[in-house]
Image (cartoon, rainbow, N blue to C red):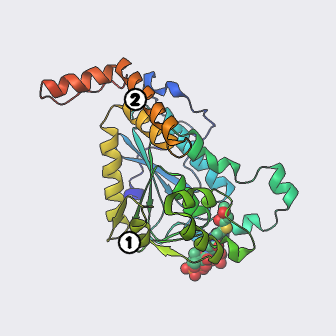
Amino acid sequence: MFAQRCSRFFIVKPVVPSASYLNRASRTFSTTGAKSYETILTETPKPNVGLVTLNRPKALNALSSTLIAELNDALNRYEEDKDIGAIVITGSEKAFAAGADIKEMEPLTFSSAYAQNFIAPWSHLANAVRKPVIAAVSGYALGGGCELALMCDMLHCTSSATFGQPEIKLGVIPGAGASQRLTRAIGKSRAMEIVLTGNNFSGKNAGEWGLASQVVDGGKDELLEKSIATAAKISSYSRIAVLAGKEVVNKSQELPLKEGVEYERRLFHSLFGTKDQKIGMKAFSEKKKPEWSHE
Ligand code: CAA
């Protein structure tokens, strides 16, 4: 339903993400020479929400190099667009993504994989995107599909979604972060069993284990409605405070507790230098709705 309402196509050209998008004038998207992507759809279902739909239905959204390059390009454009406050990534009803593209990987050798640093561009989502990203998972999220969802800041899914790391059945191991992110999210014993047996787990399990923050009993449309509503809510706050909130939660994955708490306190202090702190606290005192400046 949302995928059919593509409201904005982007010109495909590399854009380097920059921290300065907050102060830039709104981008104008030229329609001259604009082209749609081959393997994803992009749209803005709400004014401040960017939506990327993985769209290789015949291959169950297998994550080819082209798809990852297009996803990274779309994410860069949403990073640059000052109107966008949060991003949702989704797939089809049947598959979020059934993993890295096995047919593309089959001919790889050690030297070709190593020389081209295969899979490294996938990390763009986790390493370079500062706006919050929600994965909305319906159907299969296997191998790299599960790993892509794990790179997002929040994971929403249907209760019937199917997650798993089946790489062991292909004679390899996860290569896009599952051994690290899944283990941190659900604990060593469960992650070890999933990686070593290749057994799948459900969206219901994902909710019970704390991997998913929202689990929806309906289908993809109901899921997407919730994910877009969450993204819209996040977008309604000060962009500066949202960036800082994402940054400090992510630091908890890397820093020891004492350093993490100190890091949070420093960033908290720094927000008293923003206009939005004054706007937010004044609006509270005056019982008004804050009109954020995003500065
Ligand atoms: N790569 C390439 N093509 C894929 C694919 C993948 N990961 N997953 C599915 N496809 C293709 C199938 O080859 C098939 O194409 P054809 O019609 O041309 O034969 C099409 O998508 C539909 O798939 P199925 O007919 O298999 O559909 P199904 O409903 O019977 O089964 C499934 C669905 C259980 C998800 C099954 O497709 C499957 O097991 N896929 C592979 C899952 C997998 O092993 N993922 C891990 C990949 S490795 C990885 O991701 C490494 C990493 O860590 C980065």
Instruction: Assign a secondary structure to mark 2.
Output: helix
Of residues 182 and 41, which is closer to you in this image?
Answer: 182
Residue under the image location 39 percent in, 36 percent down: 242
Q: Residue 181 carries which label?
A: none
Q: What residue lies at 87% left-to-right and 56% top-to-bottom?
A: 111
Q: Name the residue under label 1.
A: 159
Q: Mark 2 points at which residue?
A: 240
The quadrant where residue 205 appears: bottom left
Check the image and report above or below for 126 versus 103: above
Q: Which residue lies furthest to the right in this view?
A: 111
Task: Say which amino acid is labelled 2.
Answer: Ile
Residue at the image position 49 percent from the left and 42 percent from the top: 257
Question: Residue, x 55% and y 38% (percent of image)?
Answer: 76
Three-letter code for the amino acid on which mark 1 is drawn: Ser
Residue 232 place in picture, x, y as percent: 32, 45
Q: Residue furthest front?
A: 258
x and y percentages locating residue 1 in the rendered image = 36, 61
Question: Is any part of residue 10 visible from this angle?
Answer: no
Above-or-below relation of 30 to 201: above
Give 150 or 109, whichever is nearer the viewer: 150
Relative height, residue 25 to residue 124 (above, below): above
Front-lying residue, 73 or 247: 247
Mark 2 closeness class: few <14, some 14–19, many ≥20 residues within 10 Å? some
